[in-house]
Amino acid sequence: MALPNARRTLASALALGVVWSGLAIGGSAAAQPAPRSAPASWTTCAADVLAEIPAAQRDKVSCAAYPVPVDHAKPRGATIDIQMMKRPADDQAHKIGSLFINPGGPGGAGLIYSAYGSSFFQPEVMQRFDLIGFDPRGVGRSAPLKCFTTQEEADEVFGRMSPVPVTKTEIRNTMDATLDYTKSCGKVAGPLLQHMSTEDVARDLDLMRQGVGDKQLTYVGFSYGTLLGATYANIFPSKSRAIVIDGNVDPALRTRNGAEYDKQRAQGFEIALDAFLKRCDTVGAKCAFSDGDPRAKFDALRDHLRTQPVTLPGGAVVTFADVIGRVSSNLYSPSTFTALAAWLQSIHDAINGVASLAAASVDVPLLANNRGLADVRALGDTPYTFDDSYYGVNCTDKPFLRVPELFPLVAKQWERESPTFGRSQAASDLLTCASWPVRHPDRWAGPWNRKTPNPVLVVGNYYDPATQYKFAQRMAKELGNARLISVDAFGHCILGDSAGADTVATDYLVRLKVPANGQVFQPNVQPFA
């Protein structure tokens, strides 16, 4: 395809949202009402599951393998088991019901999150609800979606990819390897590949709700989990008791035009980075990167690494992709900002031949968020384990033009608009989904404005990198019945880290007290404190 034609094709496709021929605008027409669900059968959790949770919780929790249809249009067909964990309410005599938790992703294994409820919820929530964590279909222990049969096969393909392809060789190798990856998914993943949409997960969730004996759903979803909450609220509005969604996507845009959504997602990271650098400048000596102009220093550092790596005094080699990946990952968590600033200063000093006053070797751990690509509320001590559900869901839910050859042009365009994060965002879903082996998926693409009995509680951070604040505003506007509360905070998602927002969420979950719209709260701790 000639470049001018490619540019016209891209422009018209993005403008019109033309991505899949024959795609229904609304939700799936194929899905049918499922039969009544059997009660969940709770038993002792497996030893390897218990090993992942705090020792104090191991005697409290129980687990269940809950069967759901692979294809909800065939409710009596083949099934898979959804793995669930229950942490019982402390006050069983006054229990309200169950509270389902989803950490996001897609691909976030949520099974053990019920054992970490105190990280997100005030004590009254723990007293009044059984907390239910679960691995969604295709994720973790719930029939994980796999595109390879051996680790060696995966390593051969992934080893040819660059997370931020810049040179012609990197771009070509990454594009070729991505085609090999999606071809392998089509051959290996099996029937579940065709049924990985968020709509499928929402229908699973409704069966699980019935399985725990609740007449209506109480749910807290983080990040991508906000799409799951919004989808459930619109497929099953009358079954929605209380839904809290924190770190919100824009559901209408995400399911209408994947490319535009991801471009705006890159812009959200740019907004968060700029705010980080401005805060660094404001706090002065508390931020190791504050000497001079942090914004100018970062831009110079990034542009230098784009052409050549640098070696730190301790011998570590830092590349362009290292900086993009680590910065995007750690913008999720303000508690890492002090170490991130020291690491950036050590890179700046190495580039400029200056003996670093920052630590010679600074450990800035990558969070469990796929180098900042996944929309997930990651537990800090949980390692990221790769399966193929991330693309399995995103490439089903998010429509993209099926022309992989456009990637170099799109990456260049996005990099002009978002110099730090545009290229890496383009190298993720846009490139992979262009050849994903699911052509006409059943998925929910609206409507989004069906009214729930109680307003959905939408929570947004001003400087959320992965789901920028405008997305929370749009989510609240698009839903048929919602209230938006905001937090003047950094980081991705906020429940558990803002006493004001936590109290509003508790009152809503426990007493169905609807907050005044538009309230703004502060985080418990500011960066560089």
Image (cartoon, rainbow, N blue to C red):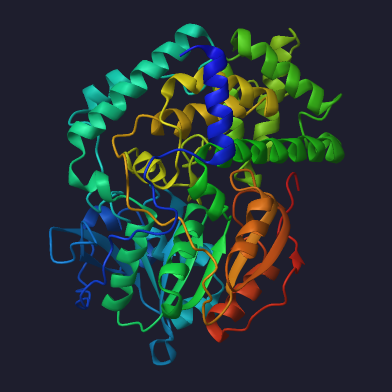
Relative depth, front residue between 218 and 77: 77
When the figure is inspected, residue 402 is found, relative to residue 197, above or below; the finding is above
Quadrant location of the N terminus in the rendered image:
top left
Position of 232 with respect to 282 (left or right) is: left
Residue 225: percent from left, percent from top: 47, 57
Residue ID at (68%, 52%): 470
Relative depth, front residue between 465 and 42: 465
Residue 172: percent from left, percent from top: 42, 12
The image quarter containing residue 521 is bottom right
The image quarter containing residue 352 is top right
Position of 177 with respect to 329 (left or right) is: left
Question: Which residue is outermost to the left?
Answer: 77
When the figure is inspected, residue 286 is found, relative to residue 112, above or below; the finding is above
Residue ID at (60%, 62%): 478
Relative depth, front residue between 450 and 91: 450
Relative depth, front residue between 42 and 390: 390
